[in-house]
Image (tube, rainbow, N blue to C red):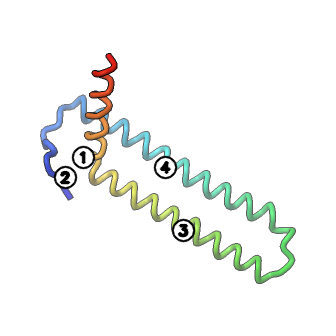
Amino acid sequence: MEAIGVNPTIDSDLEARIARMHSRDRKGLVMFVLALWCALLFTLFSIWSFISVPAIQIILVVSGGFVLLLNTAAIVAMLRHYDEDRHFIYGLDLKHLDEMRRRKG
């Protein structure tokens, strides 16, 4: 989906800035997903020995798996959306950041 009003001939400086912002966001989201997986697995393994009812263990594993699966899928979908519309999303952000710097300057 192409955003209305986006100039297809974006200059190379803006393209490089968009690529850097997109790369930073992508790295941050990947780190967030890894931290989420580590936190949930650490919590599960930390409390595992205190749970004596097998049914509760199964419920925790299944529900934790759903949380990890759905959050990971949501972030992957968000990354795809950012990649498809990155000129519109980041171009608008950069335009506003440049305007704020110009006004402070």
Considering only order in the chain, which callout, 2 or 4, is on the residue closer to the N terminus?
2
**In the depicted structure, whether residue 93 falls above or below residue 47:** above
Q: Which residue is mark 4?
A: 29
7 left or right of 99 in image: left
Identify the residue at horizontal 33%, vertical 56% (top origin): 81
The earlier-in-sequence mark between 2 and 3 is 2
Q: Disc 2 marks which residue?
A: 3
Q: Residue at x 35, y 57 (%)?
A: 80
Q: Dot 1: what SS?
A: helix
Residue 69 is labelled as: 3
The residue lying toward the viewer, choosing from 40 and 101, is 101
Residue 54 rendering spot, x and y as whole percentages: 80, 81
Q: Amino acid at mark 2?
A: Ala
User: For the residues marked 4 and 2, what is the alpha-carbon distance in whole angstroms?
Assistant: 24 Å
Which-is-in-front pick, marks 4 and 2? 2
Q: Quadrant of the C terminus?
A: top left
Q: Are the two marked residues, 1 and 2, in contact with CB atoms closer than 8 angstroms? A: yes
Cβ atoms at labels 3 and 1 below 8 Å apart: no
Q: Are marks 2 and 3 in contact (CB under 8 Å)?
A: no
Determine the CA span between mark 3 and mark 4: 15 Å
Q: Amino acid at mark 1?
A: Phe
| Residue type at numbered disc 4 | Leu
Q: Earlier in the sequence, mark 1 or mark 2?
A: 2
